[in-house]
Amino acid sequence: MPALQRTMEHDMRDELHVCEDADALAKHACEWLIGLMSAHQGPAPFTLALSGGSTPQRLYHQLAQASSGDVDWHNVLLLWGDERNVASDDTESNFRMVREALLDHIDIPLENILSVPQSEGPAEQVGESYEQLLRERFPTDEAFPRIDCVLLGLGVDIHTASLFPGTVALGEKNRWFMANHVPQLDSWRLTITAPLINAAKNVAFLLSGASKRDALSKLWHATLDPNLYPAQLVRPTAGKLWYLLDKAALGQTQLPESVRTQIVSH
Ligand code: 6PG
């Protein structure tokens, strides 16, 4: 990419879209994502990293209802931004959540669904084999591929994907995807890494409900401390950062200067 173009992209302000409520947010996020997909220029398929969490889940329900003319699922590759080391039919499985909300209702080829392998051993092994799969499916001369869109949730502890406070994966510089032990949950998670997120063309936080206000405020205004506030690691290097929120999630939180705001009227 020419240096000038990179600089211009880098200078693009973050984009904040505020919707009336959770339903309006799901509908708007769906339209927004379909817009990104429609603007995508091939021949490579549109690559979409999915998040767990209830807010993205509502988006998947909406996407499942989109008319078949709106999304060419044959030209979309899905990957999972975070997962639990469980069987794919486990109620904890993000794959299961996405399957029920979206995959069961759309016409998408199986080879376009890059789910994390069902748990067949230690999380580290599963993480390595999924990373291998991603490296095979997204060959690149760069250290990280440029995923077209990474969807993210935000936890009240300011975690995103499965990058939790104080965990090892926060410091990762080379891996694309890895197992991450989360002592506070006494459990392993599987997660994309911050540098993979930051290489993406579009990264979007989806936040709904007043319970997210404090997390959002820390993400935007707390002194930079990703070990305590992992979502602060998210800072696309050459892509665009989006915040898709409902009014309850925003509350009276002061806006950072770096965002351009759009109030969504429907
Ligand atoms: C997961 C994701 C997590 C999620 C946030 C927000 O739970 O699978 O790892 O990052 O997106 O915890 O979740 P909610 O939208 O449900 O609050």
Image (cartoon, helix red, strand yellow):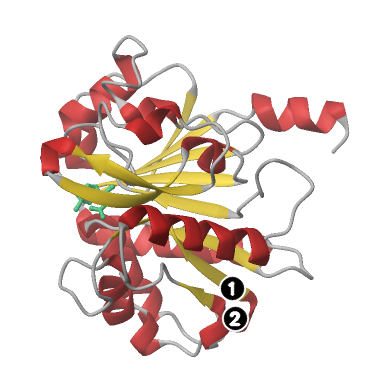
Q: Is residue 214 left or right of residue 199?
A: left
Q: Amino acid at mark 1?
A: Val
> Could you say which quadrant of the image residue 217 lies in?
top left
> Could you say which quadrant of the image residue 72 lies in?
bottom right
Q: Is residue 266 visible?
A: no
- Report how many numbered discs are placed on residues in the image: 2
Label 2, label 1: how far apart the Cα atoms are: 7 Å
Q: Which mark is residue 76?
A: 1
Residue in the foreground of this view, choosing between 43 and 32: 43
**Do the numbered discs 2 and 1 sit on residues whose CB atoms are within 8 Å?**
yes
> Could you say which quadrant of the image residue 80 lies in?
bottom left
Q: Is residue 135 above or below residue 164?
A: below
Residue 34 image point, x, y percent? 53, 66
Residue in the foreground of this view, choosing between 37 and 87: 87
Q: Is residue 214 left or right of residue 83?
A: left
Question: For numbered disc 2, what is the local secondary structure?
Answer: loop
Residue at 63% over, 66% down: 46
Q: Which mark is residue 72?
A: 2
